[in-house]
Amino acid sequence: MGFTPDMAFIQMAGPMLLTGVFLMMFIIPVTGLCMASVDPDEQEDSAGISNFMRVLGGAFATSLVQTGWTNAARQNQAELTGAMTQGQATLDGMMASGAPPEAARTLLAGLLEGQSYMLATLNVFAAIAICFAFAATLIWFVPKPKGPINTSGGH
């Protein structure tokens, strides 16, 4: 499935719902490993620290993703503007069909901005996919707990 600026909400919601399901398949076992790695009387503290670190990591990740997305959109817009060889011809065509010069420039700038944000979204999704693949691989190197995993102490 290709992502385009004119895609419908449901086209974007489907992959995001899958991401949520797989994220839970990652978070719950990691929490179980955290709680199984400590003594039963320390499970409440382990659950609290695990949740705190997950929320703190989510806050940092949100900030980094937003900053990266904005910077990528700005960079993509500069590259698209530089690569546009028919910009003046496009504006002339718009004005020949009756658009005022300012409206034609605004329309072309909006089109470039929309395309640059779509490219930035694809770049950010690719970076997040790489991070998730790394995290999913990293979990196999975590020391395994010795006993059964009982997460009831953290609730």
Image (cartoon, grey):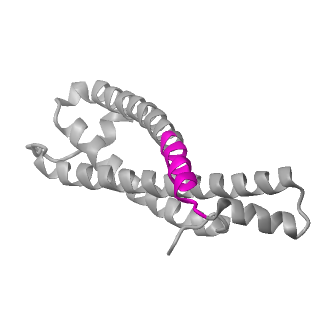
* Residue 51 place in picture, x, y as percent: 38, 32
Quarter occupied by residue 34: top left
Nearest to the observer: residue 2 or residue 117? 117
When the figure is inspected, residue 117 is found, relative to residue 85, above or below; the finding is above
In magenta stretch: residue 79: yes
Nearest to the observer: residue 103 or residue 88? 88
Quarter occupied by residue 38: top left
Most common secondary structure along the magenta stretch = helix
For the point 32% across and 40% down, which residue is it? 152
Quarter occupied by residue 87: bottom right
When the figure is inspected, residue 137 is found, relative to residue 86, above or below; the finding is above
Nearest to the observer: residue 67 or residue 84? 84
* Residue 76 place in picture, x, y as percent: 51, 50
Q: Name the side, left or right, on which 82 lies relative to 22.
A: right
Q: Residue furthest bottom?
A: 1
For the point 68% across and 58% down, which residue is it? 111
Nearest to the observer: residue 131 or residue 40? 131
Number of numbered discs:
0
For the point 16% across and 36% down, which residue is it? 37
Which region of the structure is painted magenta? 71-85
The quadrant in which the C terminus is found is top left
* Residue 42 place in picture, x, y as percent: 23, 25
* Residue 49 place in picture, x, y as percent: 32, 26
In magenta stretch: residue 51: no
Q: Name the side, left or right, on which 142 lies relative to 6.
A: left
For the point 85% across and 54% down, which residue is it? 101
Q: Name the side, left or right, on which 13 lies relative to 102.
A: left
